[in-house]
Amino acid sequence: MLKTSLGEKEFERSGDFISGAKKVDGIIFNIQRYSTEDGPGIRTTVFMKGCPLRCSWCQNPEGLSKEPDLVWYQTRCVAALECLKVCREEALKLTEEGMSIDREKCTRCGECVKACPAGALELIGKRYNTEELLDEVLRDRVFYEKSNGGVTFGGGEPMLQVDFLEDILPKLKETNIHVAIDTCGAVPWKYFERIIDYVDLFLFDLKLLDEQKFREYTGGNIGLVTDNARQISSRKIPMWVRTPIIPGYTDDEENIRSISEFVVRNLPTAQRYDLLSFNNMCKSKYERLGMNWELKDVPLIEKGDMEEFRKIAEGTGLSNVRWSGPTRIGGE
Amino acid sequence: MVKIWEPSEELPDRIKKLREEYFSFYDRGYFRNEVIPFTTGTEWDELYSYHDWGDVPELFNYFAGIRDSLRSMAIKVDLPENFWAESSATRRAVFFRKVIEEYLPVKILNGELIVGSHFSTALSKCFTKKEAKAWWKEESKWLKEMVRLHDVGVMNCGAISGHIVPDYKKVLEKGFKGIKEEIEQQMERHDEKGEKDYCKSMIIAIEGTKRFAERYAEEAEKIAKGEKNEQRKKELLEIARICKKVPWEPAETFHEALQSVWFTHMLDMAAESYPGPGLSHGRFDQYMYPYYKKDIDEGRLTKEFAKELLECFWIKHNYAYDFMGFVGVKQGITSGFGQLMTLGGITKGGEDAVNELTWLLLDVIDDMNMLEPKRNIRISKKTSDKFLMRVCESIRKTQGSAFLLNFDENAIKGLLWEGLSEEDAIDYGVVGCLENTAQGKDRSGTVDVNPNLAKPVELVLNNGRDMLTGKLVTSKTGRPEEFLSYEEFEEAYFEQLDQCLEKALENASKADEIRAKYEPTPYLSSLIEGCAEKGKDVRNGGPVYNFITVEGVGIATAADSLAAVKKFVYDDKQISMEELIEAIKNNFEGKENLRRMLSTKAPKYGNDDDYVDSIARNISRHWTEEVFTRTSPYTGRRFRGGYLSWNYFIDFAPLTAATPDGRLRGTYLSNGIQPVQGKDKKGPTAVIRSAGKLGLETAPNGASQVIAFSSASLKDEEHLEKFASLLRAYGEVGGTALQINMIDPGTLKDAQKKPEEYENLLVRVTGYNAYFTVLGKEIQDEIIARESHAV
């Protein structure tokens, strides 16, 4: 897989996200209500498109690109072939293996999506302006109130769309709704600076502390990530630190220990530490996006190993360490 | 991981044995609570009313056979002199009394502490020859019209027994002796002979309870004589003592109170003839608590023994299913009894009503793992976090099957809307499945009338004719091709709906009239406030409150159909009305693309989408307000709305043509106030909000909503708390009643086969989410394996 990441300069140039304009749309690939996995209480998670990292194990590959992605669902297709008729670029071909999408030719115009009677084609990634998104996320307000929940922005990397966040977060705060940002941390600090006053909690990913490995597996600069983590904590914002446990990448004891020690020493506002086991369910997503996934045949983590990692983390003095996610079936 | 609910290992041996005995239907030839029919012996006798079963379409073809079988099997009861000179109510009372005093077999099972076994009966209607003739004429005429309307998918109806909360509290406090005195006082007040006579019949019926209980006392003493085990001997003598006392005298101890309630309850079922479905205890934890507390405080009772008594009491209810034991021994093939027990809620003063006994009952429920009595927990704003979490734990442990949840604020709002006093509304009980009713004074007739709300869509499209048979069902509303706007289409829908309701209510009124006129139940009337005061039967407008509930079927199918027409025909003009009608008449044959489009691209109720939710609300408000303006002429009972829809969403499926929401003929209609199967794609909060928008106070009976959760969503304390908060929010923005289901491996396997019906099934792991049906087969299999085994 291509390992590219945006450096600070590229960020400045990626005008789509950082326009400086007062009104920008958010580009969102999913809005998940009754979200129970992304912070306290019942939440709505807004998944935003575009990511500066290219982690080998990425769970939401549809969030990588800032452009909409065209996908085809085999189980819904009724072979009506209406899509082929309307495609001006001739980017679609229904083969024995399924729909072949020429992603070079495809302009994401969405005509095929409209034409398909069965909803088998979908453009992932929709523009919302602030008012539209507010209307959507405020619908579950009573559920947030009853559960001390709120709204989480995740992705992708929501911080890439800081212009949009800067517009919507103050409005959410006016309604007293708890706001969490789920971030990989790999964006310049000044982006955080622009919204940090409106954030109640950061779900902060620390995947690997080894500089070289981090660059190799994610394309990012760990120094930027850890600096941002320290700064957030120094601003007294609560954090939940998360580490995905990926076989062959992040699942060594030393990595967990060093992350835990980093948290103990540097992040006084860290309230909990979550270890998330590797999950292979995104395999179908890669297939639909026409992407090859290096980890597609990697087996799940064993339960005992997750327990072990939790103990290692606790051994460094961290409290409230939890693990979740699927583990290997059988042999337990 | 789903660990299927099992009975507790900790159950006392006595309870384990009694429980197993119940489940061994074939092995207990010495006792099966099968129906025993009793006759006056006249050649014109009737023991079976079709209208009792008018809401069970599966039975229509067997009616005549059952009627004949019961008649031919019936035991003749010796009648006293002058029997035929008495009024119909008195004849019924005398007959009932005679049966329970002399004929109904007495059986005490080994080890049980609460006694009272045979209660399934089919009692003679005690008709004179003239009455029998008149009754049959009216009954068969009613049936013919009802079946006609059913067969074209419009409705079914009857005058259903049970579904009532008798005043058991009064029996505990005053005994039947006290109740008799009250009726005597009322009798003095009445000038009219008919009313006086009616009161007399009530007294005759309840006087039978004394001798009936004594027969059990005698049996206990008889067994005690031969009993070697000293402990059991003591128990039997205590049983004998109690049976000599209750239900005739007031109960004083917890044991006496339980025995009194059981006798009173089983005799209700006997009086209404089998099976008396939905006959419910009301707020059991409230009226039983004083007896529990007194015994505990005075050191007469331990918590452990109280639990054992309750467990004995529990098992008795399940014997109701014996009547179909030879058809299916698994707690009844239809699970259709619904002897409900209402727990929790608020006190008359508006405070949390949960007490120690409520907590103990939750343990009993968890440990017993039995179907009956079914449990309804009232959740209110005042319900404590601790208790709510306990309820959630039970839901997790029992895969949701332990209880149905009723939400006080929303339920009470509806009951006030229909005119209950504030005091009665706050003190409501639940009958059948989820139907809200006043306790001890309300004949609310739930499940009596069941109209199909999707049928009028077909009647609009086909201008009053059933598409399958071509029969004219309703009068014409014009050619839909000529409607210029959606508003015209909607207006035609409401006109067709009104015509269907008109026919349904007329027919239901007839069933109500027949029952009221010919089949009084003086015993049950004695337990319902208002009957003695008015000198009228519970079935004839005697109670303080009198309703007949109309349970709307298929609201989401109807709303989604109207929304699809609005969007595609009128708003977007993507298809013409001609094309739509043609496709629907052909059941979408050769029009799969059109069907898919309607099914996947139109707005669907259940997604918090105002476009369609507002249509659903209009339909709901329209028909519920419409029926509430009507009463049944003979009894004066007022029609009120609700959404129970039992299994009619299946029965009506082949009788309803394809619908504009892309549904094919034969595919189930929507159930209760749930979205069309698989169409709610935004999760539970969106479904709850859609339901809340219906404005359910005009459906005061209550509305059935089921939400399925994966076991992962309740996996630990943190998730359980989130789930509890969801329930709290439901009380504010949702409906009146909620049943929780757990998604099991079977559901997932079904979803693999029928992805279209499970588009809403979401897989969620931290940092990741996807719809189950779009995952690759191999990943799906893995998820299924995960749900089936330990994760």
Image (cartoon, rainbow, N blue to C red):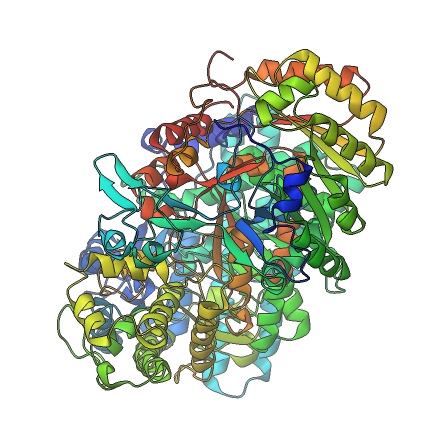
- The image quadrant of residue B460 is bottom left
Of residues B701 and B333, which is closer to you in this image?
A: B701
- From the viewer's perspective, is B387 left or right of B440? right
- The image quadrant of residue B737 is bottom right
Kindly identify the residue that appears in the image at 60 percent across and 27 percent down: A219
Name the spot of residue B555 as percent of width and height, x first: 40, 66
Name the spot of residue B318 as percent of width and height, x first: 45, 42
Of residues A231 and B190, which is closer to you in this image?
A: A231
Q: Is residue A265 above or below residue B557?
A: above
Q: Is residue A163 above or below residue B46?
A: above
- From the viewer's perspective, is A257 left or right of B645? right
Name the spot of residue A220 as percent of width and height, x first: 64, 29
Of residues A295 and B164, which is closer to you in this image?
A: A295
Tally of numbered discs: 0
Q: Is residue B251 visible?
A: no
Kindly identify the residue that appears in the image at 16 percent across and 70 percent down: B582
Of residues B230 and A100, which is closer to you in this image?
A: A100
Kindly identify the residue that appears in the image at 34 percent across and 83 percent down: B485
Q: Is residue B63 above or below residue A59?
A: below
Name the spot of residue B17 as percent of width and height, x first: 49, 27
Q: Is residue A198 above or below residue B138?
A: above
Q: Is residue B4 visible?
A: yes
- The image quadrant of residue B501 is bottom left
